Image (cartoon, rainbow, N blue to C red):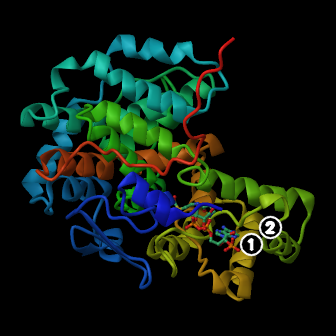
Amino acid sequence: GYDVSKLLKETGAVTFDPGFMNTAATTSAITFIDGDEGILRYRGYPIEQLAQHSSFLEVSYLLIYGNLPTPAELDAFDQRIRRHTLLHEELKSFFAGFPRDAHPMPVLSSAVSALSTFYQDSLDPFNEEQVELSTIRLMAKLPVIAAYAHKKSIGQPLLYPDNSMNLVENFLRLSFGLPAEPYELDPLVVKALDLLLVLHADHEQNCSTSTVRLVGSANANMFASVSAGINALFGPLHGGANEAVLNMLRRIQADGIKPEDFMEKVKNKEDGVRLMGFGHRVYKNYDPRAKIIKATAHEILGKLGGNDQLLEIAMRLEEKALADDYFIQRKLYPNVDFYTGLIYKAMGFPEKMFTVLFAIGRLPGWIAQWREMIKDPQTKIGRPRQLYVGEAHRDYPAR
Ligand code: ACO
């Protein structure tokens, strides 16, 4: 009901683009996406090749520093991260302050924000050594904080990191290990988690990454900016979707609804119900990450003994959706989250941890984007305009 062009003229703004559907906020040399073709590349390398040959640690290095590391560079990166896994002892008391049933995502964002109070010697965004130190600290400590948030929520004691293990192995041990009991790593779980983290490592200017950049554009430090990104990721339309997918599949199973009937509800937009794990702002084709995950979901679930019935329901929904006019017309395809929840569940993670796992995966992307933004001479503080549609001038009434 508003005359947008008139409002634009009045404001002196040139575009009205709610949701930034059509606005490039930055140049970037990190991640390339072609949503129509279903292409995703990190620093030029196709996601399919990285998924097959690389590792989360190597992909993190690639995203943050721009090139694949030599074996010596990768080893040095790994060793530096291992040396920084310990959390300040007082930071651990933080975990006692939250209610026991707290969702681990706000616990994670709060603790990451608190890193600015414990590690004040690496907060200057324009000091390269400090930026490097914050990078390593975040890579090393965020997975530890994530595992502690999980342990806290199930009432188990917090273990110290074991630095004979790499980042992914350590995270699994801290999440599932118990004191005085040796923890045996399952190579299949390590490999599957590593792959999932690689697939989530960056996705250009999505909501959480744009948040990291916007907060960082005010020269906020890396811990503060990443903490803001974690809060954005907590939203069910973004990182919370994998949890929402599993809840949806469970509900369908528990209520004994036929996938066909559920699809009708979605299409009729009953109670605003959506097919979670479907649709994407950029991909108007099969999400290439979903393709990779779909191919391995069966193998992983077969070996880990996942819930076959839920996988069956998921596959049936997918099959129906891909053949349905509603989804075809709107170009709605499965996104990366459609299958990940089932795999996380089979690994033993509770639903509440799913988005936390996404955050661990997305961390190198956030760091790489923050570093690129800070170094970019074109960066200005992010400050969108608005079209004012409220009351015109009003005089305060005499009383
Ligand atoms: N189920 C049913 N209908 C859908 C779905 C869905 N999952 N997604 C979009 N639509 C419909 C909308 O109702 C709308 O229909 P209309 O034109 O008749 O009104 C049309 O498709 C376009 O939808 P928008 O919401 O405008 O698309 P947008 O690009 O803004 O949203 C989003 C993208 C948020 C991902 C959306 O598809 C969605 O809500 N999906 C479910 C949640 C989800 O899986 N999120 C994960 C995203 S991926 C990630 O973060 C890793």
Q: Position of residue 296 (x, y in %)?
A: 51, 71
Vertically, is 351 above or below 107?
below
In the drawing, does residue 4 fall left or right of residue 324? left
Task: Give the residue pinned by disc 1.
Answer: 312
Quadrant into which the C terminus falls = top right
Q: Position of residue 44 (x, y in %)?
A: 22, 73
Vertically, is 316 above or below 105?
below
- Ligand 1 image-quadrant field: bottom right
Vertically, is 194 above or below 357?
below
Q: What number is the disc on residue 269?
A: 2
User: Which residue is the extreme one toward the front?
Assistant: 398
**Mark 1 residue element:** helix
Vertically, is 141 above or below 58?
above
Q: Earlier in the sequence, mark 1 or mark 2?
A: 2
Q: Nearer the viewer, residue 64 or 81?
A: 64
User: Which residue is the extreme one toward the right?
Assistant: 256
* Location of residue 238 by image quarter: bottom right
Of the residues tagged 1 and 2, which is closer to the observer? 2
**Mark 2 residue element:** loop
The residue located at (45%, 61%) in the rendering is 16
In the drawing, does residue 292 fall left or right of residue 142? right
Estimate how packed mark 2 is, as few (under 14), some (14 to 19) or many (20 or more) residues with alpha carbons within 10 Å.
few
Q: From the Cβ of disc 2, is ligand 1 less than 8 Å away?
A: yes
Q: Nearer the viewer, residue 67 or 203?
A: 203
